[in-house]
Image: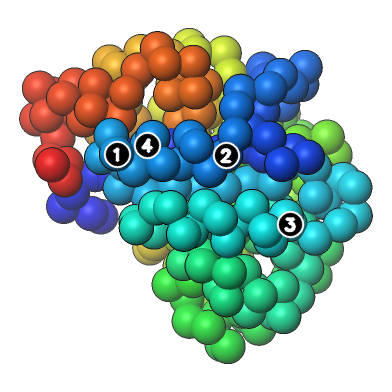
C-alpha cells in the first residue's frame, strides 16, 4: 500500500528494561528503552514501537513514565502497546506522548473496544497487534495468541484481522511467534496472506536476522518492517537495513 517502506525498531519492555528472547521465551536484558530509542532515532528510524510485554500477564497498566521519557527523546511516531484495556488507557498514553496505541489481548476479550478507540481517537491511532502461530486447527493455518504469546485462542488470524479492520483498526502489526527471535527471516507466507485481506497497512514482525531479510518481507506485502534483537545487539543499524532495501529497489525515507 505504501510508497515508502518504514523501518521500525521494536522495544519489548519488561520492568522498565528492554528484553528479548526466542519465540517469546527466555527473555534477556538488552538495555535501557530511552537510550535505545534515542540511538535508533539518530540512526534514522521511521518509527519506534514500544511493547510492554508483561503488562497483560501481570494485569497492570503500561509503564507510563518510561513512555513519557521515550517520547521526550525521539521525534518520530511512537506506538505503544501492552496493558491497554479501555479508551481511558489510550487517552493517557497519548497524553504521555504516544502517537499510536497497539491493542491485542483486550480486543480479543472484548472486540467492541476496537470501535470505541477508533470512534474516540480515529483509526489512525489504533494498531491491532497480532501475535500469530501456525496451527492446523484454523482455516488459514494461523491462530491468534494472547498474553505475550502464552495463551492460544481459537481465532483464525486472518478472520480476526478482517474483523478488526471492520471495527476500526488502522494498521496491523503482524508478529510471527514461530519466527520471533530466530533470525531465520520473516514468515513470508503469513505476510502475504495478511496483505491479501488487509485494506490497511501491514507491519511485518518476527524473524529478521540479516539485512537481506527485509526486502522479501516488503515484496510479500509489508508496508513496514519491524525488528528488535538485530538492532539491540548492534548486529545491524537502521541505516544498514535501509541501504539493503534501497539496493533491492525498495524506496525508504533517507
On residue 33, the disc is: 2
> Residue 108, located in which quarter of the rendered image?
bottom right
On residue 40, the disc is: 4
Q: CA distance from mark 4 to mark 1?
A: 5 Å
Q: Contact, CB < 8 Å: mark 3 with mark 4?
A: no
Tell me the quarter of the image containing the N terminus: bottom left
On residue 124, the disc is: none
> Residue 39, located in which quarter of the rendered image?
top left
Residue in view at x 77 percent, y 17 percent: 26
Mark 4: secondary structure: helix
Residue in view at x 50 percent, y 37 percent: 35
Labels 1 and 3: the sequence-earlier one = 1
Q: Contact, CB < 8 Å: mark 3 with mark 2?
A: no
Residue in view at x 58 percent, y 61 percent: 68
Labels 3 and 4: the sequence-earlier one = 4
Where residue 212 appears, as percent x and y from the top left, is 27, 15
Q: Which residue is mark 3?
A: 62
Vertical relation: 250 (above or below) 81? above
Mark 2: secondary structure: helix
Amino acid at each position: 500500500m505504501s510508497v515508502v517502506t518504514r523501518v521500525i525498531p521494536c522495544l519489548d519492555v519488561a520492568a522498565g528494561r528492554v528484553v528479548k528472547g526466542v519465540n517469546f521465551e527466555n527473555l534477556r536484558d538488552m538495555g535501557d528503552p530511552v537510550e535505545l530509542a534515542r540511538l535508533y532515532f539518530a540512526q534514522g528510524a521511521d518509527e519506534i514501537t514500544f511493547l510492554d510485554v508483561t503488562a497483560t500477564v501481570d494485569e497492570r497498566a503500561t509503564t507510563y513514565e518510561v513512555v513519557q521519557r521515550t517520547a521526550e527523546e525521539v521525534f518520530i511516531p511512537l506506538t505503544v502497546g501492552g496493558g491497554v484495556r479501555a479508551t481511558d488507557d489510550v487517552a493517557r498514553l497519548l497524553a504521555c506522548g504516544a502517537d499510536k496505541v497497539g491493542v491485542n489481548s483486550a480486543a480479543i476479550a472484548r472486540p467492541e473496544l476496537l470501535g470505541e478507540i477508533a470512534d474516540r481517537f480515529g483509526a489512525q491511532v489504533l494498531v491491532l497487534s497480532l501475535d500469530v502461530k501456525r496451527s492446523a486447527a484454523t482455516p488459514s493455518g494461523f491462530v491468534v495468541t494472547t498474553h505475550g504469546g502464552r495463551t492460544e485462542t481459537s481465532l483464525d488470524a486472518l478472520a480476526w484481522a478482517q474483523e478488526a479492520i471492520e471495527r476500526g483498526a488502522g494498521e496491523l502489526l503482524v508478529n510471527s511467534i514461530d519466527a520471533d527471535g530466530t533470525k531465520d527471516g520473516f514468515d513470508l507466507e503469513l505476510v502475504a496472506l495478511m496483505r491479501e485481506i488487509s485494506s490497511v497497512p501491514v507491519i511485518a514482525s518476527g524473524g529478521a536476522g540479516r539485512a537481506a531479510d527485509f526486502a522479501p518481507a516488503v515484496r510479500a506485502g509489508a508496508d513496514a518492517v519491524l525488528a528488535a534483537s538485530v538492532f539491540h545487539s548492534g548486529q545491524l543499524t537502521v541505516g544498514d537495513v535501509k541501504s539493503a532495501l534501497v539496493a533491492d529497489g525498495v524506496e525508504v525515507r533517507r
